């Protein structure tokens, strides 16, 4: 394992303190989760290489010339690679969550506001086709009887 300092504990502390109250909190959650996923992916993938390299140096049986240890070391490291892929998926899930939030909640609000702005100049009421005039259709008595 590497002795470098990691940013994951600080990011995890931020994630634990976060409360969902506004859309900015969801954005911050997605950003932090993505950062955790990327850092864990990178760290675990590097550790997988280190573990495979260390285990491949094991002598093993004399008649395999060390090939058996190299293959087994790669098999052990492959499990960490799967874990690294899972960490990357966690980070991607945060990004997809925020994109779905935008698509299902923010975008409809923007479209509704746009439609409301477009309809402000129009007068409310009922109308079909052309507006009736005194000489056109829709005059009193035209429907077959006299209206008093």
Image: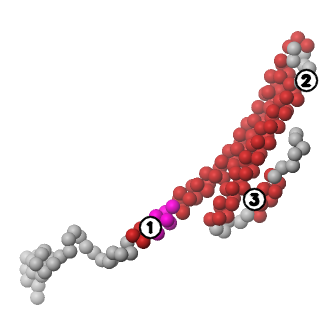
Q: Residue 21 carries which label?
A: none
**Up-down relation of residue 80 to residue 129 (above or below):** above
Percent across and percent down for residue 134 are: 13, 80
Tell me which secondary structure the magenta stretch mostly adopts.
Answer: helix
Tag 1 near tag 2, CB within 8 Å: no
Q: What stretch is highlighted in magenta?
A: 107-113
Q: Mark 2 points at which residue?
A: 58
Percent across and percent down for residue 5 are: 87, 49
Q: How crowded is mark 1: few (under 14 residues within 10 Å), some or many (20 or more)?
A: few
Residue at position x 73%, y 64% in the image: 18
Label 2: element kind: loop
Tell me how the rendering is colored. Answer: secondary structure
Q: Residue 15 carries which label?
A: 3
Q: In this view, does 14 lie to the left or right of 127?
A: right
Front disc: 3 or 1: 1
Residue at position x 72%, y 56% in the image: 32
Q: Name the residue under label 1.
A: 114
Seen as rendered, the residue at the extreme top is 63
**80 or 120, which is in the foreground?**
120
């Amino acid at each position: 394992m590497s002795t470098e300092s990691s940013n994951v504990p600080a990011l995890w502390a931020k994630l634990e303190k976060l409360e969902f109250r506004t859309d900015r909190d969801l954005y911050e959650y997605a950003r932090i989760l993505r950062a955790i996923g990327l850092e864990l992916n990178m760290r675990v993938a590097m550790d997988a290489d280190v573990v495979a390299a260390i285990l491949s140096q094991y002598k093993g049986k004399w008649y395999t010339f060390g090939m058996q240890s190299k293959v087994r070391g790669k098999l052990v490291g492959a499990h960490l690679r799967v874990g690294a892929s899972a960490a990357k998926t966690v980070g991607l899930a945060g990004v997809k969550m925020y994109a779905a939030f935008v698509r299902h909640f923010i975008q409809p609000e923007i479209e509704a506001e746009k439609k409301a702005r477009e309809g402000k100049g129009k007068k409310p009421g009922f109308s079909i086709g052309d507006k009736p005039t005194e000489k056109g259709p829709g005059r009193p008595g035209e429907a077959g009887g006299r209206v008093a």
